[in-house]
Amino acid sequence: MEKGYINLIDENNKEVRFQIIDMIEMDNDTYAILMPLDDNEEEGVVVFQVLDVENQVLELVTDEEIVMKVIDEFNE
């Protein structure tokens, strides 16, 4: 998955477009830092674990500790 844009389906089955800010390799896992481009989104960046790069299978990271580690790694 390269930097650019990706469309994901949210929990309401609605397509949401994200900008790929960066990809981080950490603890033998790959994480994607994404920014939603939908004007209705109130969140800043979100972190997804990349489960399958080729098929763009992502899982939202809900563990705040992991999110902070990924963001800290990005900021270094």
Image: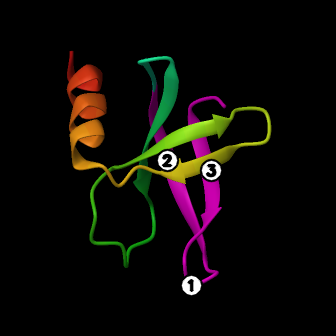
| Upstream in sequence: badge 2 or badge 1 | 1
Q: Which of marks 1 and 3 is in front?
A: 1
| Residue 25 covered by magenta stretch | no
Secondary structure found at label 2: strand
Q: Where is residue 12 in the image (x, y as percent from the top left)?
A: 56, 84
Question: In 3D space, how far apart are the residues under numbered discs 1 and 3 (Cα atoms)?
Answer: 17 Å
Residue 12: which disc?
1
Q: Where is residue 69 in the image (x, y as percent from the top left)?
A: 24, 30
Q: Which of marks 2 and 1 is in front?
A: 1
Q: Residues within 10 Å of mark 2 (few under 14, many from 20)?
A: some
Residue sitting farthest toward the bottom: 12
| Upstream in sequence: badge 1 or badge 3 | 3
* Residue at image location 28% in from the left, 64% down from the top: 43
Q: Report the label total.
A: 3
Quarter occupied by the N terminus: top right
Quarter occupied by the C terminus: top left
| Upstream in sequence: badge 3 or badge 2 | 3
Secondary structure found at label 3: strand
Q: State whether residue 63 is above or below residue 3.
A: below
Instruction: Give the image quarter of residue 54.
Output: top right
The residue singled out by tag 2 in the image is 19
Q: What amino acid is at disc 1?
A: Asn
Q: Residues within 10 Å of mark 1 (few under 14, many from 20)?
A: few
Give the extent of the magenta segment: 1-23
Q: In this view, does 28 lie to the left or right of 64?
A: right
Q: Where is residue 13 in the image (x, y as percent from the top left)?
A: 64, 81
The residue singled out by tag 3 in the image is 6
